[in-house]
Amino acid sequence: MSSSIKAVLKPHLRDVGSLTVRRVLPAMAARLIGPFIFFDHMGPAALEPGVGLDVRPHPHIGLATVTYLFEGAIMHRDSLGSAQKIVPGDVNWMTAGRGIVHSERTPDEDRASGLTMHGIQTWVALPLDDEEIEPSFAHHAADTLPVVERNGVTLRVIAGTAFGATSPVETFSGTLYVAGEFAPGGAFALEPEHEERGVYLVDGDLEIDGTSLEVGQMAVLALDETVTLASTHGARVMLLGGEKLDGERFIEWNFVASSREKIEAAKRAWTSQEMGKVPGETEWIPLPERK
């Protein structure tokens, strides 16, 4: 393995209703990469007509959820009253802060016809000063995100800064989050602009300084090194990372916090249904029993 790669993270498969996801973060070798504490690759999965994604209302604290799709559509609703359909290339960024509740479902019109679902869902842990900020939701259409071309590679800056471009998505700490598409023979140098960096291979083939990465794996890059990413036949990748988070974070179910006490308080609030309601929805996911 190249010296520019600190670790290679392998996914664990999880069933999420009608979808199977590859869960890469958190991992034993890397609990976080920059502020990213959770990384799910969902699909691709062909949903038959009448079948859809139905993630019932559930809570979050201490993080921002980021949804980015390659195929399909999701209808987001939350306890702030937000109702937003996300389609490929858009960004849904929901800041939970002190607490928010949301649901994610296949839109009615897409459920009727059937569709393929494929995308990435991540959680970004909030810094201490913003951990209990007021919750908020922001949607950014695909055409508002900056795109950079590098030697046969198209790089869309989803959040943060990269390659001299800055996303309009508001972040709370230095952030790297980029979707890259390699044409056959595409290659570029990734400089150490950000303190911590990861490279995830969605599909296709990719070499990092000559070391091949398998589909579904994430390479954690060494600090302060410029690395070359190259694809022979074409690839789709996600670049993620940013500045190291300001201290340890605990994660349990859908909660992220700097202390176990905050998580226990959120669990009690959710069990007593004091964290808010999603307008128009009566279902909710109960707190899982500890094994």
Image (spheres, rainbow, N blue to C red):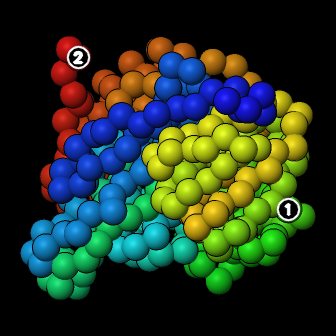
Q: CA distance from mark 1 to mark 2?
A: 44 Å
* Quadrant position of residue 2: top right
Q: Looking at the image, which residue sits at the far left?
A: 50
- The residue closer to the viewer here, 123 or 189, is 189
Is 235 above or below relative to 152?
A: above
Name the residue tied to disc 1. Answer: 163
Is 73 above or below relative to 21?
A: below
Helix, strand, or loop for circle 2? loop
Task: Give the residue at x 24% y 81%.
Answer: 110
Q: Is residue 170 visible?
A: no
Where residue 49 sits: x, y (%)?
12, 78
* Quadrant position of residue 210: top right
Task: Give the residue at x 60% y 78%.
Answer: 142
Amino acid found under the numbered disc labelled 1: Phe
- The residue closer to the viewer here, 64 or 196, is 196
Name the residue tied to disc 2. Answer: 290
- The residue closer to the viewer here, 17 or 210, is 210
| Circle number at residue 31 | none
- Using a 10 Å C-alpha cutoff, classify the residue at mark 2 as few (fewer than 14 neighbours), some (14 to 19) or many (20 or more): few
Task: Give the residue at x 48% y 59%.
Answer: 203
Whether residue 288 sits left or right of residue 174 in the image: it is left
